[in-house]
Amino acid sequence: MDTNFTYLTTELFFGFIALLFLTKILGKTQISQLTPFDFISALVLGELVGNAIYDKNIGLNYVLYAVFFWGTLIAVVEAITQKWKKSRGILEGKPSIVIKRGIVDREQLKKNKLDLNQLQNLLRNKNVFSINEVEYAILEANGTVNVLKRSPFQTVEKRDFTTTFSPAVLPVSVILDGEWVEDNISETPFTKKQLEEALLLKGLRAEHVLYGEWSYENQLYIQTAHSPYIKYIDI
């Protein structure tokens, strides 16, 4: 076999193994939840490996070094976002409410460099063909839009045949990783003090809670780090 083909085959094989191994280590978020940071990581990693494979002056050791050094940087950033919550907005991006109570938020569209045509396209990907159907639309950090429809357009369930329409209300995360989300509390009809008192009645404080969500039923859905993991607290 030609030495060029032997060289290329060897580097392609080991480059493939190295990338596969790195993907297993870093987890599925590199594929299923592609944030701007992940997108840049994938481009740079592909460029590093591609250049190394087709440049005969760069040996296999450089290919493996490039893959694992870049993978280490990605792993360090992921560890930072896990440990320090405030870094997540910078490194992973933040979701934005682009439609709130049926009203398109133009400021959020401008902030996210999104126009109405693009918004409509994202909504159609969710089988929503009219903005009039939408109560809330959230632009996620990975560029997708998730939608809460207005009551008349929501999927009909058996219980809906015996009840009248009620306004759709977006559930609000009030506790994340043991910390109050101050901005979100203002979206509920309760004060932080009232929520704290509701928790105390169950012998809980915010630091005991992994995730806390307020819903339209005036309930706190609580997931704690210790058993019983899930609680529903009436306010």
Image: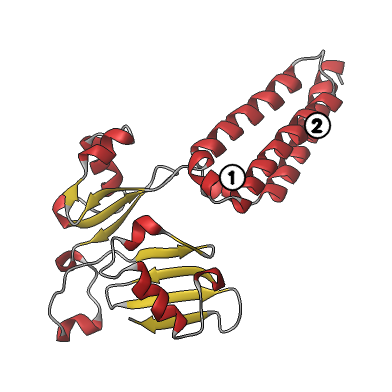
Residue that carries the numbered disc 2 in the rendered image: 64
Which corner quadrant of the image does residue 183 belong to? bottom left
216 and 195: which is toward the camera: 195
Residue that carries the numbered disc 1 in the rendered image: 30
Residue 28 seen? no
Q: Quadrant of the C terminus?
A: bottom left
106 and 35: which is toward the camera: 106
Q: Quadrant of the N terminus?
A: top right
Q: Is residue 103 left or right of residue 145?
A: left
Residue 125 drawn at (x, y percent): 31, 48
Residue 118 drawn at (x, y percent): 27, 37
Q: Is residue 97 left or right of residue 15?
A: left
Residue 172 drawn at (x, y percent): 35, 64
Residue drawn at x 51%, y 79% as measured from the top left = 204
Q: Amino acid at mark 1?
A: Gln
Residue drawn at x 74%, y 37% as measured from the top left = 16
Which corner quadrant of the image does residue 228 belong to? bottom right
In the displayed structure, 194 sits above or below 66; it is: below
| Residue positioned most to the front | 193
* Mark number, residue 100: none
In the displayed structure, 172 sits above or below 229; it is: above
Residue 217 seen? yes
Residue drawn at x 18%, y 68% as measured from the top left = 151
First reached walking from the N terminus: tag 1 or tag 2: 1
Which corner quadrant of the image does residue 196 belong to? bottom left
Q: Amino acid at mark 2?
A: Leu
Q: Secondary structure at mark 2?
A: helix
Residue 192 drawn at (x, y percent): 36, 68
Q: Secondary structure at mark 1?
A: helix
Measure how far apart labels 1 and 2 are at the Cα level: 19 Å
